[in-house]
Every structure is written in C-alpha cells, then in structure tokens.
Image: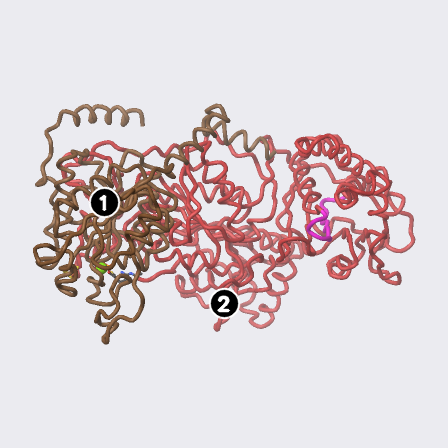
Amino acid sequence: MIVEAENLEVKEIRLTDRPKYTKKDLVADHPTWCPGCGDFSILSIYFKMMEKLQVPHEKITSIAGIGCSSRFPYFVNAYGVHFLHGRAAAFATGVSLMRPDLHVFVFGGDGDAFSIGGNHLTHAARKNVKMTYVIMDNFVYGLTKKQTSPTSPLGFKSKTDPTGAIDHPINPMKQLIAAGATFIARSHSHLPNHVMEMMEKAMQHDGFSVVECLSECTEFYPGAFDAANPRKGGVFNLVPAEHDATDEVAAYKLAMADFPGYFGVFYNVQRPTKNALEARLIADAKAKSENATPVELLQKTFARLS
Amino acid sequence: MIDQKVADASASSGGQQPQRGRRIQDAVIRLAGNSQDGIQAIGSFLARLAGRTDKDVMTYMTIPSTISGGPSIYQVRLGTGEVLSAGDDVDILVAFYQHSYNDHINTLRDGGILIYDSDNVKPDENQKRYRSVGVHITGQTVEAIGGTAKDKGKNMFVLGLLARMYDLDVPKLESMLQAYYKSKGDDVIRNVIGAFNAGYGYDIGRLTDTFKFVPSTNKTARKQVVTDGNQAIAYGALAAGIRFGAGYPITPWSSVMEILRAELPKYGGIFVQAEDELAAIAIACGASYSGHLSLTGTSGPGLSLKTEALGWAVMAEMPIVIIDVQRGGPSTGLPTNVEQSDLNIACFGGHGDSPRIVLAPSSVEDCFYVTLEAAKLAREYSCPAIVLTDQALATRVETWEMPDIAKLMQDLTPDFAPRGPNYKAYQNTVDGIAHHAPPGTPMLDGKYPVVTGLEHDETGHPASRPANHVMMVAKRRRKLQVLASRLPKAETYGPPEGNVLLVSWGSSHGPVREAVDKARAEGESVSGLNIRYIQPLQPGISEIMDGFNHIFVVELNDEGPYGYGQLAGVLRARFCNDKIVGINKTDGLPFKIREILNGMNERLKKTPGPALTHA
Ligand SMILES: Cc1ncc(C[n+]2csc(CCOP(=O)(O)OP(=O)(O)O)c2C)c(N)n1
Ligand code: SF4
Ligand SMILES: [Mg+2]
C-alpha cells in the first residue's frame, strides 16, 4: 500500500505540470441522441466548463440513471456510471460521501428525477449531500418513446394519454424548494451561456445543487419550450435582479409564475452538508477514542464482550 | 448429552428430600414473564457468566410483537462442552405470572422443576409430572429492597436464586452486575445487589435439588466472547475492513445497522440511514464504486426491493456485501420469527441471469467469519456477496472464542495507482475476474471507463451484439465456477458413508448436529452435512451423497408442491438426485432435535430404501 501511495504522489506532481486538456480530450462516443435534441447543448457546455475549470481529468465523475439524457456518461471521456432508472442521486450519495476529492455530477431526465427517482431526489436534497444534479427536463419520456412524464403539461397528447394528459404536473422548482435543496436554478438548453453560468454556480455551491434545464425533445415534444426561446419568438425571463435567493418564500413565489416562468437562481443558501456533518462525527469519534487504530478499537470492543 | 443430565430426576419429584450439588452436564432454563420484568437481563448475565467460566451457552428468546409489555420469554442453555441448540425441553421453568405458567408449563420436561412466583401464580397442585417450588418472588423482593423498586428487582432476585441453585460463580456475577449498572448510580446498584443477595440467600436448596456443572475438560486457551449473531456480523464487517454501509430499518436486521452507525465513525467510516432499501443498496453501490467496499443489509421485504440494484451490481461487476436476516415471509409475514425462506431470492432473485455469491453462517461465531469471508470474496471476484443469516441467529446469544483481531483485520485502502494503457474494466480474463479502477485513478492512455448496467464490451461500452452478450454472460458466470473450484471440499459430520445424511444450512446446523449425535448414540447410521457455501456449492457434495441411502435436507421453509424446500431444490437441480427429500417446518421457531429425528424416522418408514450397507 505504501508503495502505491508513493506512486500516487509521483503522479500528482506530474499532473500539476501536465498540459491542459481540451474539450477534444473529453469527447468519447458520438451521442446517440436525435438530431437537434436539446441534450447536445448541455453536453457541450459540460465539456466547455471542464475545459475552463481544468478539473483534473481523472476526477471528473458523471453519474446517470436511465433515459435518453442519462446516456450522458457514455459521451464523456471521464469516469462515468450508468446506473438504474431514478436512483442516480442515491448512487451519487455514496460516491460523494466517501470521496470528498471528487465533485460528483448527476445527469438525468424528468421521469428519472421526479417520478421513479422522486424519493431519492428528495432525500439527497434534504440531506444536502454535496453534488450537482442537472435535470434535463423535456416534459416527456424520450427513451421509451413518448409517454406522459410527471412534468408533461395538462392536455399533452402522449401514447399513454392519447386524449391529453389529465394528471396535474409537478412544478420542479416548488418540489426542490420543499425538499430542502440548497441551490436551485432553472435554465434552457437553447441559451448555452445561461446554462454554463448556472452549471458553474451550481458546481461552486457547497451542498446539493440542482439545475433544471429545459431541454427539447425534438422527436416527441418539438417546440415545447419555444415560448421561452427568443429565437422562436418567445421571452426568456431572467429571475429579477432584486430577487433574494436566500428567501424561501420569495423563491416559492417565483416558482408560481405561469409557463415559461423565470430562469436563473431561485434559491441559494448555506446549510451544513451531510459530507461535513459526517466528517464531524468521524472527527469527534476519533478524538474520543484518542485516534485508536482499527485493531485497537475492535480489540477493545471484544474485550468488553468477554 | 441430554440423557446424562439429571438422569434420576423423575424420582426427585414428589415429596422426597431434595438433593444438593447434583452433577449435571447442561441445563435448560426458561424464564417466562413480561418484557418489562427484565428477564432478558437475567438471561444475558447468565450467558456472559458462562463465557467467563468456560461454559458454552446458547440462548433463545421471543420478542413480543407489541412494543411495550406483553409476555416474553428468554431461554438459556448452559453447558459444559459444546451447546448446539437452545434445548428441546426445559429443565427449569421460572414463571412470573399465571399466563407465563399456563403458556409454558408444557415445555417443562417430565421430572423438571417449576419455580413460580407464589404471589402471582396458582399452579396445578395435583400433578406429579414435575416438582413445583413456590417462592414469594414479588414479596421477597419488596422485603429486600423496598416497595417502589419491586418490578425492577424481581429479575435480580431470580438471578440470585439461580446462582444458588446452580452453584454459579457469585463474585464474578457480582462484579458483572457492578460494572453493568455502574452508570445508573449507587442507588440502583444497591438495589440490584440487595435483590440478588436476597435471592441467593433464600437457600432454595431446602425446597429443591441444587446442581453443579461437571468441570470442563477442554479448556480453550483463548478467552470466550458472548454476542448475538447480529453483533457478530457488524464486528465481522469492521474486521473485514468495511468502512461504509447503508440501510433502512427493518426487524431483525436493524441492530446490525445500529451498531455500525455507532461504530463506523471511530474507524473513519460512515453508515447512512437511507430513505428505503432501493436507496440503501444504491448508495452502497456508489460507495463501492468510489473504491470503498460497502455493505448493505435488510430482512425479507427489503431484499425484494434490493434485487433491482443487486442485478446492476452483478452486471456492473461491483463488489458489495448484502446481509439478509431472514424472517417469516412472504410480505410482512412473521417479522419476529425465524424462517429460512429467502434462499431462492438470495440465489436467483432479480431478472436476467445474475450470478452472485451466497454464504450462510451456521452459528453466531460463524456470522463473524462468514461476513469477513463474504467481504473478501466480493472484492476478489468483483461480485455481490450475500450473507444469508436469520432471526434465530440474529437474536440468540452464544459464547465463542475471542477472534484474533490483529491477524484478521483487513485494510482495504483503495488502489489509485495509475492504470493502463489499454486498461479494460471488464476484461474477459481466463477466470472472468477483472477489477475496477476507482474514480481518481489516472489512466495512462487518457481513456476513462464507464461502469454500467447495460450489456457492454470489455471497455464498458454499451454493446448488444449477440456474440458479446454470450461472452459477457459467460464471463460473469465463470467467476462463480472458478470460485467453486477453489472452495474447500465438503466434509460430513460423522462418517462419510452411511444410511442417512442430514443436510443443514444456516441456523439448522446446530440442531442437526445434535440430532446426528443423538441418533448415533442410539446406534443409528446418520451423518450430517452443512452447506455454508450456498452459491456456488463446494466440491465433493455429490460424492458424499453417493455414500448414503437417504438424504434429508432440514430447513425452516415449506416443502413446496413436490416435497422439498429451497436448498433441497437447488441440490436436486444440481445433482439430479431424487433421494433428496425435505424435512421442513414453518412454525417460525428453530428446529427441535426431536422434530428432526421424528421427521427422519417418518420418512424412513415410508421409504426404507436399500438394505443398510454401512454401520
Ligand atoms: C425500473 C425501470 N422502469 C422503467 C424503465 C424504462 N424507462 C427507461 S427510461 C424511462 C423514462 C425516461 O424518461 P426521462 O427520465 O424523462 O428521460 P428522457 O428519456 O426523457 O431523457 C423509462 C420509463 C427502466 N429502465 N427501469
Ligand atoms: S427521443 Fe427526444 S430526448 Fe431522446 S434523443 Fe431524441 S430528441 Fe432527445
Ligand atoms: Mg424526459
């Protein structure tokens, strides 16, 4: 083990003076998405952001559930995980808690986040586990070919609602505020600069940060977000400058606006992360046991049991 | 062993003079009261005392299904030499209440001794089956320590009675009481010791026989420890180097997670209480992926929920340890009773072909070592490993030899040494085994792997080509075949050939061994075979089976539509041997020796089989 630790140090030294990587180094498979799919833009922003921030290549970790958007990790040449439908946030919790040296990104769709993964999203948020979750919201189930999603608007005609959706949709912003996420932003994949700004801010946040990014499914819900796309005659309403992002009620009010609503940072507060709280438990426990080694600790336990 | 003890006991019922200091090999004591009477405390003090005085012990208790109060029992079997089961019949029944007497008097063996609280219980005065000894347990306790403490002190009074009756090591007991109640303050200690002394001083020898255990002949050099099975699992995980766990509360698994939640921070680790079992295993998979072997665990319904991610771990070849403390099922079933009915879901649960490792501990001590081994195998084979324990093992207390922690402790620091070039996370090696690089590991050729539940090629890229799926399915299966070939050869308990082979697994191991001893003592040709490696199976089982006329698989599950239970089904499928028949039961209680032997004899009557060739 010691030998390996030495190796690692040598490597670290080399890494600091290695050449900067470019977007090209981060490109893996060509995405399998349909032409024009909004997800392309989020992928290229991720590349651009990593290139800018130069997060060490081997520390980039992207985790996803299942869905069109969740294919994301295959398209990034970095550590990646393609996990289960809805449970990427839970998986990322394990990674984040054990590896403070990594900044964990989660990518996935609206069904993944708010339907099958709703409970996991809620609890990762309330525990304030450090990670950045980018929800690529297309208001539809893409991968399974056009079923109603929890964010599909009333009346949306899908294969499971041929006469139009009748179930009240989830409001992602309200849901996330109520869950206890500490950084909540909303963006639109047709405005790459805004997406980049939101993702960077999210990444800088010490805690559970989430960006809901409207991302058009050109195949099954074309034009869904035109109303917020200036190039298609829509209006892109930024969160008003006077909005106090630490005010939960104000954030909630912003979230009440009719579609297409506002874009920007809705909510941003500091609360101790689970990572920090667990680290404190460890520090306290170690202090109390006077940094006993694992062998000493377990020997003591068994002495008590004899 | 049972026979040697109190052989002439029946003579002592009725009005004869009690005998003092009779030599016995072991004793089965059942304490029956309400859960708030602290009868568990009596039992656990007896158990710990046994551990300190070279005696073996096994306990058995029922947890009342209601949270507070309610009838509860604690049974302790103390013995010189190996104690393999909690005992079929009770030598001494202590009844605190009328309902305790009514409900448990039938468990008292002929010639046994009933001790009852004559302030609360009116026993049948005309019977001659056992000796009845009335003691004013409530009144005497009040007299000793005052009225306010009577409910609290009765258990200590009884402990004193039993200490007198069995000539137990009183200085050791007293020092244990002192140490245990130290934090509760002087008043409590005074009452505890007061009640204990009153019980001890009662001189029960005037009313009934008293006993002395024959001294132990095989004193072990190592100290004994006293734990229940769930403690052994938690400490086994710590010794295995596991520093991360995640779980969701469910009986009887919860105490493992409670211990780990308290202990792991001292070791620099974390235990997460997840929102549900789906999350618990997902979180654990994430921590394992990050480079730290992780543990999750559950009981019954929780394992059903975990099968989705279990399949992912098989496909992604992610090491992870999963504890399943079996209870009665299906659905919510019998949450506080034992059953061995999760074997099928443990081995086969989930969709698709998903080979995983399954081990079953056969005693409290084995819970410790099996957890250690599961952790090693999971890592070595990049595969989920399930520890299939059960409610009986989880809650009973046994003495076992102090483990050599300095020798056993594993350090599982992740290996971040650079990999490559051409590193393949899913390399199709000869033995099928490949290992992941944790994130943070530099790749010398700049190509980074994706870990996935989609079928993939050797580099982790999604690949649905027919030939690739054939190759990867075989790779995942081959790991288990390789593991099987490396496992130690199966061995019988008793001669390797004979008339009857009793096959056990998990908590049926102890009773089966005792049944084998008993049958052999009566001249029958019976051997035992315990299956510790449920999947894959050890080599040598087929050869052993060939040496017997009858093979009975003893397990706590239903015999199913075809007359055999879950392990028997696996063995039948594996060995195409229709001699394999089940001895099953589903009453939610551990096997009694008698039940096993009766089951065996019934089946032998039905199918006598070929003439006995081996003695
Ligand atoms: C347990 C489970 N249930 C169902 C599915 C099928 N499934 C895969 S993706 C998906 C929904 C995808 O929608 P969304 O999460 O919005 O992602 P998108 O494809 O729109 O990006 C479903 C239902 C699955 N993979 N696993
Ligand atoms: S189906 Fe929709 S979400 Fe999926 S790739 Fe095509 S456009 Fe994108
Ligand atoms: Mg979607």
Question: Residue at 24% across / 73% down in the picture?
Answer: A164
* Element type at mark 1: strand
Is B32 located above or below residue B364 in the figure?
A: below
Question: Marks 1 and 2, Cα distance to the nearest angstrom?
Answer: 48 Å
Q: Residue furthest front?
A: A242
B468 within the magenta span: no
Ligand 3 shows up in which quadrant of the image? bottom left
Label the magenta part by its dominant secondary structure.
Answer: strand
- In the rendered structure, which amino acid carries the disc numbered 2? Tyr
Question: Residue at 38% across / 60% down in the picture?
Answer: B348
Front in this rendered view, residue B490 or B273: B273
Front in this rendered view, residue A182 or A119: A182
- Any idea which chain is the red one in this picture? B
In the rendered image, residue B390, in percent from the top left (x then y), is placed at 52, 53
Question: Residue at 87% across / 45% down in the picture?
Answer: B19
User: What mark, if any, has residue B2 been given in the picture?
Assistant: none
Task: State the quadrant of the C terminus of chain B.
Answer: bottom right
In the rendered image, residue B7, in percent from the top left (x then y), is placed at 78, 51
B26 within the magenta span: yes
Which residue, given by chain and number where applicable, does mark 1 sit on? Answer: A62
In the rendered image, residue B278, in percent from the top left (x then y), is placed at 38, 54
B400 displayed left or right of B72: left
The colour one sees for chain A in the rendered image is brown
B401 displayed left or right of A228: right
Q: Residue furthest bottom?
A: A163
Residue at mark 2: chain: B
Question: Residue at 64% across / 58% down in the picture?
Answer: B592
* Magenta segment: B24-37
User: What mark, if any, has residue B564 been given in the picture?
Assistant: 2
